[in-house]
Image (cartoon, rainbow, N blue to C red):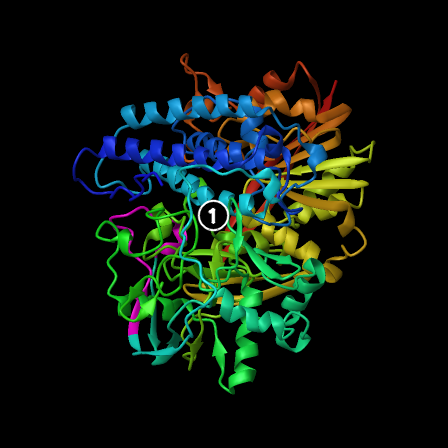
Amino acid sequence: MNRYYSYPPTLTDDGDKREEIRRYFHNSYDMFEKVFDLLKDESVFYRQSEPSRHPMIFYFGHTAAFFINKLVIAGIIKERINPEFESIFAIGVDEMVWDDLDEEHYRWPKVSEVRQYRDKVREVVDALITDLPLTLPIKWEDPFWIILMGIEHERIHIETSSVLHRQMPIEFIKEVKEFDIFDDGREDFPLNAMVDIKGAALRLGKDFNHHLYGWDNEYGTFMCGVDDFKVSKFLVSNGEFLEFVKSGGYEDETLWDEEGLKFLQIRGAKYPPFWVKTETGFKYRTISRIVDMPKNWPVDVNALEAQAYCRYISRRDGITYSLPSEAQWYRLYEHAGLKDVPSFDDKNANINLSHHLSSCSVDRFSFNGVYDVVGNVWQWTDTPIDGFSGFKIHNAYDDFSTPTFDGKHNLIKGGSFISTGNEIMKHARYAFRRHFYQHAGFRYVVNSMQNDEKKTDIYESDELVSQYCEFQYGDEYFGVENFALACVKQASAYIKNRTKALDLGCATGRSSFELAAYFDEVEGVDFSARFISVATRLKEEGYIAYRSKEEGDLYSLKRTTLKELGYENVKDKVSFWQGDACNLKPNLNSYDLIMATNLIDRLYDPGLFLQTIGTRLNKDGLLILTSPYTWQESSTAKELWLGGYKDGFGNEIRTIDNLKKILAEKFEFIDMREIPFVIKETARKYQHTISQMSVWKKR
């Protein structure tokens, strides 16, 4: 197959860095589009590979829209290319409950229109690579970090899109000459054996001055000790897994945990997803063709299937097998003597598209006696992802990792045949829901170490999110009423039509639930998935738990439930979505009330928001704005502030005056009130603030 340049550029001062990044960008862009050549014709772009996913046209447009959305958020560009595309292609990739998968809410564009859009985005990014200031080494607050973020994001979707293609019925896929497959599939397969691995003290995570781009969850430190353990010499092959299938492993409920049984009930699985049942046995689905079963290739399964298999062989052999932990995989990496990018040699592993577009025999690539430590297929671990000590969120992509810190997403390690870019690095940390399919398989271990890693804490540990949980659901302080309750109580005096409301900037959702007492339907929208995940958890699971900071590293643990809050009877009226207030999806409309709470002074373009928000309201609908008008350049470029400055004549410009000027044409000013609130930072430090509520009726 054609060789794509796919080693990530270093962040340090070596060579022509602009040209290196430009080459990396265009090769990423080209490779992504080449993968979509696998779709038989343009009609397939509008098909779903499975019900929990958007049609393929969404993914084709998503990576380009990501570039523009992140460049706008970071303040690197001021103008959008296509606001509609940058809204409908923005969110809905991972399987999160706040993803809007109702296809009636979307008017998908023509494939030709998306191609033209992608071409325009390519031009914009190429020009930025030429013109942006470049300081080496590149740090994550630099403009070039956002460019690299977009490139690495696209490389992730080269792989995840190929999985969706593989899940598409074969009649909708065509062969692409550049994408051939390995020809080493056999009926026989190597018998697995256990290899002894010596334990060691490990430091997981990397420093912020590392020489390669990284996602936020890679940074920080976790120190642990790994005991001696045994690991399977090979990845579990199709032939090895066939015994489990033939023995009725999918029907034996004792081999599956509660989550696994739910998966079986929903999917009705009887064998791995890329096996094709025939009258004489099984064949095997690659990305673009169905072939005779290669029993010597690794099996592709999800984590639940892998765990069930471990229980099966544990019972069969009288030995306790399990999936490796993240730390044990790092110890394997050390055992293999691997070197990280740029010294990594992909010729000796089935990774980085350095060979073919398929798995290969599990006994082809040896790493000091253990095969496929990296490459072939990703390897499921038993470790739910969480942040290391020192973890912090990148402001331009605050929802890359934290929505997965829920105990439901297990780490996969090692990469697959199509993994490129950041995915092939030692420190790469990707996690998926345990029922999720990737080009992923597994190996197993014995004598797994005890207490080697952090267990997922059921208490929300993100400090900012926890602070908002306390703000919205915690105690009242100094006699100041809960702000969410006070806002809705004040708003209720103006409410007449009660069909549908939008709580914009809903944070962790308290106001949305309160509004449901007055409206038939309430939609809560926030830019941050970190906040939306809390609101969704309260609705779906009936509780939230968080840590309230007391002093230094001391916290009190708090928990509240839907029942305690009195929301059990209204929760079904409320839905939560992630969204950009300055570029909302078209289906968010026809509201009788829009309440934007402490939002206006945190938007990247508040003027644009005010000019467009009226289109979302019904006639005589209410717009209620609350804000303390704490303008800051980290949120809004100073030239876009609505107040808090002096004009060229020395006149003081107040926000409320500009609100009246901007909204006058389409809104009637109704009233204005002051609402205080208190935010707890620690047991002895609080913010006491006055928010101004202004009420407007659409003409």
Task: Left or right? Give the position of 309 relative to 336.
Answer: right
Q: Main secondary structure of the magenta part?
A: loop
Q: Can residue 458 be seen from the camera position used here?
A: no
Tell me the crowding category of disc 1: few under 14, some 14 to 19, or many 20 or more residues within 10 angstroms, Cα based: some
Q: Residue at x 68, y 60 (%)?
A: 541
Residue 71 screen position, x and y as percent: 42, 31
Residue nearer the viewer, 100 or 221: 100
Task: Left or right? Give the position of 639 relative to 490.
Answer: left
For the record, the magenta segment spans: 201-219
Residue nearer the viewer, 429 or 686: 429
Kindly give the residue lying farthest to the left in the view shown. Answer: 14
Above or below 366: residue 84: above
Q: Residue at x 49, y 66 (%)?
A: 555
Task: Left or right? Give the position of 479 relative to 424.
Answer: right
Give the quarter of the image for residue 168.
Answer: top right
Q: Quadrant of the C terminus?
A: top right
Residue 142 screen position, x and y as percent: 31, 37
Residue nearer the viewer, 650 or 586: 586
Above or below 196: residue 151: above
Residue at the disc numbered 1: 400
Query: As shown in the figure, which amino acid type bears the numbered disc 1?
Result: Phe
Q: Quadrant of the N terminus?
A: top left
